[in-house]
């Protein structure tokens, strides 16, 4: 579910509406954080296994005093800055408490400089109990994203969308990831589509081609057996996402 539904509020009226929808009062910043958590709990009860945000630059460590000041500005009807960074950080804490994954869009889209995977590092470090699913290999910053997956135990790397952006970039990056990133930290496929179904299937065919290509090179080089390659492929396509998202299958 989109975290921005709660973190990117733009008016006092929007805040009051979200509180009303959950039959809760909201008169302070702490009240609104409670509203956010209640909304996430409702999503979880309805079957959600995670939330989604984007790897965007922040102005620094979240400042509670500044966030309270900005929140009061919303209450008073001013059109100033929003306490977005603080609320996003609180949402990461909520994910940890509710045992949900935070998926993070990184890389490709519009001005991709504003979506660099490295922007999320401070939040990863401040929230070691939150599980992060880092999307799209951070393309084109695939090497930096690989280091993030290696260095932080609460981060998984997701190849969703990568196979149709560039099969060659996906293959070369994944070949390097085999040397660097633990094999239990990767998801090999995610169509990042919801319709039409033909696109998801076509993307899966391309993903299987790319994974087979990378693993076959290791077998031919004599550094991996066929049985080991099958084990790795199963982890990437099946075991790892099930474990990270605690899915029932």
Image (cartoon, rainbow, N blue to C red):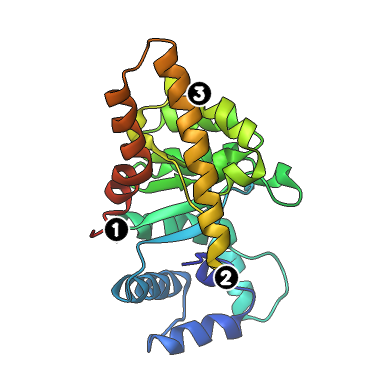
Picture disc at residue 175 = 3
Q: Is residue 200 visible?
A: yes
Residue found at the very far top of the displayed protein: 222
Ranked by sequence position, the earlier of labels 1 and 2 is: 2
Q: Is residue 197 left or right of residue 78?
A: left
Q: Nearer the viewer, residue 19 or 110?
A: 110
Q: Nearer the viewer, mark 3 or mark 2?
A: 3
User: Mark 3 vs mark 2: which is more N-terminal?
Assistant: 2
Percent coordinates x, y for residue 141 in the rendering: 63, 33
In this rendering, would 122 be left or right of 74? left
Labelled pair 1, 3 in contact (Cβ < 8 Å): no
Label 3: few (<14), some or many (≥20) within 10 Å? some
Q: Name the quadrant containing residue 229.
A: top left
Q: Is residue 224 above or below residue 79?
A: above
**Cα distance between the residues tagged 3 and 2:** 47 Å
Question: Residue at the location (46% across, 32% down)?
Answer: 212
Q: Which mark is residue 97?
A: 1
Q: Is residue 144 visible?
A: no
Who's the residue at 45% across and 74% down the image?
32
Look at 52% across and 35% down and name the residue there.
210
- Tell me the SS state at disc 1: helix
Instruction: Say what secondary structure mark 3 lies in.
Output: helix
Q: Give whichever of 3, 58 is nearer the camera.
A: 3
- Is 93 displayed left or right of 243 in the figure? right
Q: What is the distance, in whole Å, between disc 1 and disc 3 at their CAs?
A: 35 Å
Residue 59 lies left or right of residue 157; in this view the side is right
Q: Is residue 129 above or below residue 144?
A: below
- Seen in the picture, residue 69 relative to 31 is either above or below; the reply is above
Query: Closer to the N terminus: mark 1 or mark 3?
Result: 1
Residue 71 tag number: 2
């Amino acid at each position: 579910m989109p975290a921005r539904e709660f973190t990117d509020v733009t008016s006092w009226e929007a805040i009051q509406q979200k509180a009303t929808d959950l039959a809760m009062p909201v008169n302070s910043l702490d009240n609104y954080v409670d509203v956010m958590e209640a909304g996430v709990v409702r999503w979880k009860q309805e079957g959600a296994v995670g939330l989604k945000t984007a790897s965007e630059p922040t102005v620094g460590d979240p400042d509670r005093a500044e966030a309270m000041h900005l929140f009061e500005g919303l209450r008073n009807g001013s059109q100033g800055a929003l306490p977005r960074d603080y609320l996003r950080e609180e949402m990461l804490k909520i994910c940890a408490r509710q045992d949900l994954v935070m998926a993070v869009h990184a890389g490709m889209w519009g001005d991709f400089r504003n979506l660099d995977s490295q922007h999320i590092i401070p939040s990863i470090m401040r929230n070691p109990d939150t599980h992060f699913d880092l999307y799209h290999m951070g393309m084109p910053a695939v090497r930096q994203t690989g280091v993030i997956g290696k260095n932080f135990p609460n981060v998984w790397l997701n190849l969703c969308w990568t196979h149709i952006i560039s099969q060659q970039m996906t293959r070369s990056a994944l070949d390097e990831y085999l040397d660097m990133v633990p094999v239990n930290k990767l998801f090999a496929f995610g169509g990042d589509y919801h319709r039409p179904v033909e696109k998801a299937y076509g993307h899966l065919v391309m993903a299987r081609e790319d994974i087979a290509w990378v693993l076959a090179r290791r077998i031919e080089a004599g550094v991996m057996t066929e049985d080991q390659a099958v084990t790795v492929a199963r982890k990437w396509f099946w075991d790892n996402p099930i474990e990270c998202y605690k899915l029932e299958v």
